[in-house]
Image (tube, rainbow, N blue to C red):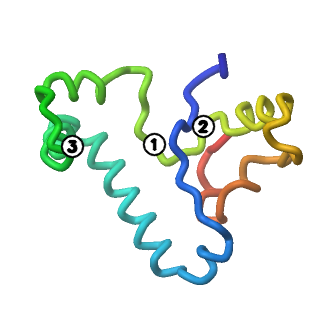
Amino acid sequence: MLGGPISFNVVAATTKFYSDNPRLYAVFMKSLTEATEFINRDKRAAAEIYIRMTKDKSPVEDILKIINDPQIEYSLVPANIMKMVDFMYKTGAIKVKPASWKELFFANMHELPGS
């Protein structure tokens, strides 16, 4: 429907928080990057950690099947954000349509090949 994967989960912060807490923001982004890289590098270990941390009773193989779903991508690249923005604008969910996905993200994300 959107012509490819979409960033389903996007972490939000206000500009005030970002400006007032640059070190905290940087540490969070570094941690998020490390976690994303870890999941992509060792999905079995990621599934085991998930089960341990959430106390989920599912077998590791069930969680691994979800993590390995070819339609799910673990990435920090904002994907198809503007297609979602177009939809939200057309339906009236947002009143002002940004010209670019970059208007919705802080500068550290602008170097990524988002859409």
Under tag 2, what secondary structure? loop
Instruction: Give the quadrant of the N terminus.
Output: top right
Q: Is residue 8 left or right of residue 67?
A: right
Residue 23: image location, x then y, percent: 47, 81
Residue under the image location 12 percent in, 32 percent down: 57
Q: Residues within 10 Å of mark 2 (few under 14, many from 20)?
A: some
Residue at left offset 22%, top offset 36%: 43
The percent coordinates of residue 63 (x first, y second) are: 22, 28
Q: Amino acid at mark 3?
A: Tyr
Q: Residue furthest top?
A: 1
Q: Is 92 or 36 nearer to us in this picture?
A: 92
Assign a secondary structure to mark 3: helix
Q: Earlier in the sequence, mark 2 or mark 3?
A: 3
Q: Which residue is mark 3?
A: 50
Q: Quadrant of residue 109?
A: bottom right
Quadrant housing residue 74: top left
Vertical side of 108 occupied by 37: above or below: above
Compute the Cα span from label 2 to label 3: 25 Å
Residue 86 position by quadrant: top right
Viewer-proximal residue, 85 or 39?
Answer: 85
Q: Residue at 88% of width from left, 48% of height from top? A: 96
Q: Which residue is mark 1?
A: 75
Q: Residues within 10 Å of mark 1 (few under 14, many from 20)?
A: some
**CB of mark 1 within 8 Å of CB of mark 2?**
yes
Residue corresponding to mark 2: 79
Is 96 situated above or below 17? above
> Disc 3 versus disc 1: distance between alpha carbons?
18 Å
Kind of residue indicated by mark 2:
Ala
